[in-house]
Amino acid sequence: MDASLRDEMKAFMTELAQASGELILRYWRDEENLLVERKADSTPVTEADRGAERLMREMIAERYPAHGIIAEEFGNERADAEFVWVLDPIDGTKSFISHVPLFGTLIALLHKGQPVLGCIHQPVLGELLIGDNETCTLNGEPTRVRECAELSQAVISTTDPALFAAGKHHVPGLDKLAEKAWLTRAWGDCYGYLLVATGRADLMLDPVLETWDLMALIPIIRGAGGVITDWYGQDAATGRYAEGANGSPGSRSAVAGGPDVHRATLGVLLG
């Protein structure tokens, strides 16, 4: 993808983020009328999730009708197209319904199956993070991961520590990681990755991420000078995964941080 097309897609990604953010904020401010439902997997969903995704899908269809879409709430369209948008309208719905601003909208653009652009938008805090695998900006200003050579100096976060207690998510060495870190926190969902990409945390890891949770994170972390893999050290976009809905790649793990702390973390996880 050449520079002019990349800039065009970044501008449209910004439009998607701003339009969906305005819709989400209306529901955020109307707590009394926010209806929360449970999906089949018992995770919560709201009309803000559905409305934001519906709006972005309509905008994509109008501007780029040949592009495909992979999204959480309403499924896939032309998932094998040359350009595919991957949408998670509210990543962190549990935070959203609790009025905790750790949620965000995730938007990724795949070109020939590879993530080339990613966006995290936090509308309450007014933070828009966009990465293209080479650069990353927060509200237009360049941002980088923090230099951290030792786990003893690292701030490590994850979305839900309880997930690591489940046997199927256990990784050899995981129990040792928290002991070696300086601080361990639960600044979760996509906002934890935003904190890593802006140098406010050193490492973010999750045992289970769906395609729409993950793809936007890859160009962001790489663009900020970091490394993101699954926790076997394989490419985050193509590593180990379970089959997802409609034949699409499903849940994967993720370890994201600066090169030194990422290397040290894999040494503990797999050592």
Image (cartoon, rainbow, N blue to C red):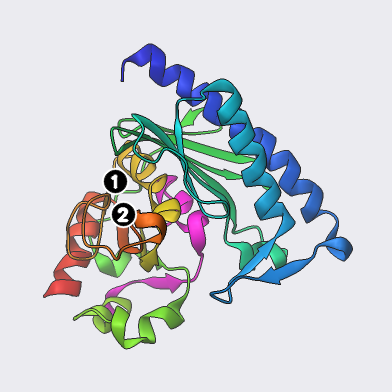
What is the number of callouts on the image?
2
Q: Secondary structure at mark 2?
A: strand
Extreme-right residue of the structure: 32
Q: CA distance from mark 2 to mark 1?
A: 5 Å
**Which quadrant does the C terminus fall into?**
bottom left
Extreme-left residue of the structure: 271
Given residues 119 and 101, the one toward you in this image is 119
Q: Which residues are magenta?
A: 179-202
Could you tell me residue 113's position as x and y percent?
Answer: 29, 38
Contact between labelled residues 1 and 2, with CB atoms less than 8 Å apart: yes
Q: Which residue is mark 1?
A: 226
Extreme-top residue of the structure: 4
**Which quadrant does the N terminus fall into?**
top left
- Left/right placement of residue 202 relative to residue 31 reads left
Determine the image quadrant of residue 4.
Answer: top left
Q: Which residue is mark 2?
A: 257
Looking at the image, can residue 190 be seen?
yes
What residue type is disc 2 on? Gly
In this picture, is 231 found above or below 175? Answer: above
Q: Considering only order in the chain, which callout, 1 or 2, is on the residue closer to the N terminus?
A: 1
Q: Residue at point 57% right, 61% down?
A: 92
Q: Residue at point 31% right, 87% down?
A: 167
- Left/right placement of residue 263 relative to residue 243 reads left
Looking at the image, can residue 123 be seen?
no
In this picture, is 115 found above or below 15? Answer: below
Given residues 187 and 234, the one toward you in this image is 234
Could you tell me residue 135's position as x and y percent?
Answer: 35, 30
In this picture, is 103 found above or below 52? Answer: below
What residue type is disc 1 on? Gly
The crowd level at tag 1 (other Cα within 10 Å; few <14, some 14-19, many 20+) is: many
- Left/right placement of residue 163 relative to residue 127 reads left
Q: Residue at point 23% right, 58% down?
A: 262
